């Protein structure tokens, strides 16, 4: 018998010479329709597709979808193929691109103590990165004193160092370095413990080739594209979120063509009398405004938790005598590159566009009630004054 992973497709068209095509070299699927005395060959790429459930799948023949362990959900390729979904849960492994890692019993909630692992193998040796999209991500949050993930944790191992996270992270994402060569598996682990909690997760795991336009820059845990967008710290929530401790990572924004600068503003906060869109350090649990803090040295320096926006300055700022032209570290309870209780739009021209995030392992008694941050960004076009 012929192995499933390799066979020869033999085609005779109009009595021409025999054509033999190794299946392992194909980047498309062939469907043969016999209309005697001729054959019609239908070819379609194994491209991404949108399933009838709204999830992302791969366009395959029905038989190939079943052979790979997927589930057909809708048609593609003008009804010659099916949109094949791949779902995996605890204790399983996958080598299929854009697999969904879900909790046990999904779509029902999960309330148990244990460890749930998914091992990811490369779909192709040329894969360099893995993107994790948190379509649903609801775990128990950190403890309230020092904001450490003691009960539930999401852990990534086998790639670049990734901080453990917990809490609510639906809509956020991560990029993981997949290493070189065909080996180097990456493991995703969800650890659950502590009090009863209605957990659920659905994480889309997509593999990115080294030559892809969507490959993130080196050293970026998060990577955004587009002229404008929004970045949020993990477990950020206006009403109930708590900034996570022990975080060290970089958020990168691709510099789009003909854009040379970038502006950041704190997101609108509709849940509180005083905005909590940027609360990284200090006691922000009350309703009184907490000043911004900047820099490395001085009475208002950022020494525990901060973001770094290289050479940041307020839009429209005119530096006074002896004042530094810009700062790097920003923290406190107000988003401003100067010491103030009034929010400001912050501007930077340093390239590449990056925001570094750092939090230590201690909050109380000095840092209380901090939510983290939510920032909207808009890239600024190149002009004679901005290059």
Image (cartoon, rainbow, N blue to C red):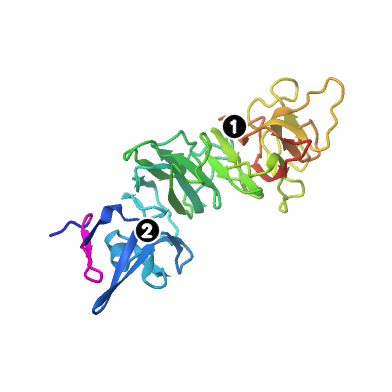
Tell me residue 299's x, y (percent): 75, 22
Q: Does dot 1 land on a helix, a strand or a loop?
A: strand
Q: Is residue 253 left or right of residue 380?
A: left
Residue positioned 38% across, 64% down in the render: 44
Label 1 crowd (10 A; few <14 / some 14-19 / many >=20): some
Task: Establish if 198 lies above or below 161.
Answer: below
Q: CA distance from mark 1 to mark 2?
A: 35 Å
Classify the position of the C terminus by image quarter: top right
Based on the picture, tell me whether residue 226 belongs to the magenta stretch.
no
Tell me residue 42's x, y (percent): 34, 69
Residue for badge 2: 86
Point out the stretch of residues depicted in magenta.
5-18
Badge number at residue 358: 1
Tell me residue 198's x, y (percent): 48, 55
Q: Would residue 245 be seen by someone viewing this image from the given angle?
A: no
Which comes sooner in the sequence, label 1 or label 2?
Answer: 2
Residue positioned 84% across, 27% down in the render: 319
Quarter of the image where one finds residue 193: top left
Q: Does dot 2 land on a helix, a strand or a loop?
A: loop
């Amino acid at each position: 018998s012929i192995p499933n992973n390799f066979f020869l497709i033999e085609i005779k068209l109009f009595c021409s010479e025999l054509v033999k095509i190794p299946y392992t070299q194909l980047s498309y699927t062939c469907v043969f329709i016999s209309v005697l005395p001729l054959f019609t060959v239908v070819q379609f790429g194994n491209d991404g597709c949108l399933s009838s459930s709204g999830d992302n799948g791969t366009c395959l023949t029905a038989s190939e979808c079943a052979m790979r362990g997927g589930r057909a959900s809708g048609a593609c390729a003008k009804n010659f193929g099916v949109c094949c979904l791949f779902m995996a849960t605890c204790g399983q492994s996958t080598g299929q691109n854009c697999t969904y890692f879900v909790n046990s019993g999904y779509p029902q909630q999960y309330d148990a103590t244990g460890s749930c692992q998914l091992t990811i193998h490369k779909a192709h040796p040329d894969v360099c990165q893995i993107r994790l999209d948190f379509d649903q991500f609801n775990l128990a949050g950190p403890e309230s004193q020092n904001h450490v993930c003691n009960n539930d944790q999401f852990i990534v191992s086998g790639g670049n160092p990734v901080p453990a996270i917990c809490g609510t992270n639906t809509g956020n994402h991560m990029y993981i370095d997949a290493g070189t060569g065909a080996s180097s598996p990456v493991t995703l682990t969800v650890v659950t413990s502590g009090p009863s909690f209605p957990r659920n997760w659905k994480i889309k795991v997509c593999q990115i080739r080294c030559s892809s336009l969507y490959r993130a820059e080196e050293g970026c845990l998060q990577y955004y594209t587009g002229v404008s967008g929004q970045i949020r710290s993990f477990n950020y929530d206006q009403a109930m979120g708590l900034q996570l401790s022990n975080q060290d990572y970089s958020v990168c924004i691709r510099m789009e063509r003909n854009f040379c600068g970038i502006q950041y503003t704190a997101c609108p906060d509709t849940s509180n009398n005083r905005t909590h869109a940027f609360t990284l350090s200090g006691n922000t649990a009350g309703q009184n405004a907490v000043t911004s803090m900047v820099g490395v040295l001085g009475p208002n320096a950022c020494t525990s938790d901060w973001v770094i926006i290289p050479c940041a300055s307020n839009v429209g700022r005119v530096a006074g005598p002896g004042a530094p032209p810009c700062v790097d570290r920003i923290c406190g309870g107000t988003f401003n590159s100067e010491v103030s209780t009034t929010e400001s739009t912050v501007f930077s021209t340093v390239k590449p566009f990056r925001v570094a995030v750092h939090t230590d392992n201690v909050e109380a008694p000095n840092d209380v009630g901090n939510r983290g941050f939510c920032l909207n960004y808009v890239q600024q076009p190149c002009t004679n004054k901005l290059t």
